[in-house]
Image: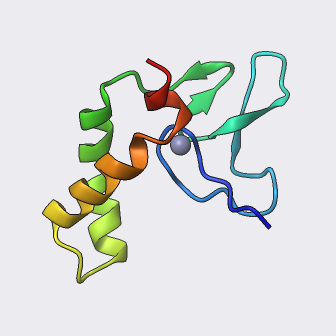
Amino acid sequence: MEEKYCQSCGMPMGNTDEMYGNEKDGTKSKDYCKYCYENGEFTYNGSMEEMIEICVPPMTENNPRMTPEAARDMMRKFFLILKRWNSK
Ligand SMILES: [Zn+2]
């Protein structure tokens, strides 16, 4: 089974639609998690670099052996394949 990620922040979405944000009409978004996307709009409109900075602390917390530098490096590569950052 294909692993799904939020196409904005890269969070794994799991096998249910629980993590997905909703569109204006209440249907679930197919691409974005509930933290990034609410009522048809992104909750956060910064740049990719800013998004990465927000993700570094939770990431290093979950992976105590990962340095902030390594986390940034990894996310820069990963974010470029996500729809939100890839479509420009
Ligand atoms: Zn997200």
Q: Quadrant where the N terminus lies?
A: bottom right
Say how many tags the image has: 0
Q: Nearer the viewer, residue 81 or 16?
A: 81
Q: From what the image shows, is residue 24 above or below residue 65?
A: above
Q: Which residue is at a point 26% across and 81% down the rendered structure image?
A: 64
Would you say residue 36 is visible in this rendering? no
In this picture, residue 84 sits left or right of residue 13: left
At 33% from the left and 38% from the top, the residue drawn is 51
Residue 42 % position (x, y): 53, 24
Q: In front here: 35 or 70?
A: 70
**Direction bottom: furthest residue:** 65
Residue 45, percent from left and from top: 39, 21
Q: Is residue 75 visible?
A: yes
Q: Is residue 13 above or below residue 46?
A: below
Q: Quadrant of residue 52?
A: top left
Q: Position of residue 24 (x, y in %)?
A: 76, 16
33 or 83, nearer to the observer: 83
Question: Residue sitting at 50 percent across and 37 percent down?
Answer: 8
Relative side of 22 to 70, left or right: right
Q: Measured along the vertical axis of the image, is residue 86 above or below residue 35?
A: above
The C terminus lies in quadrant: top left
Across and down, in percent, residue 48 comes to 32, 33
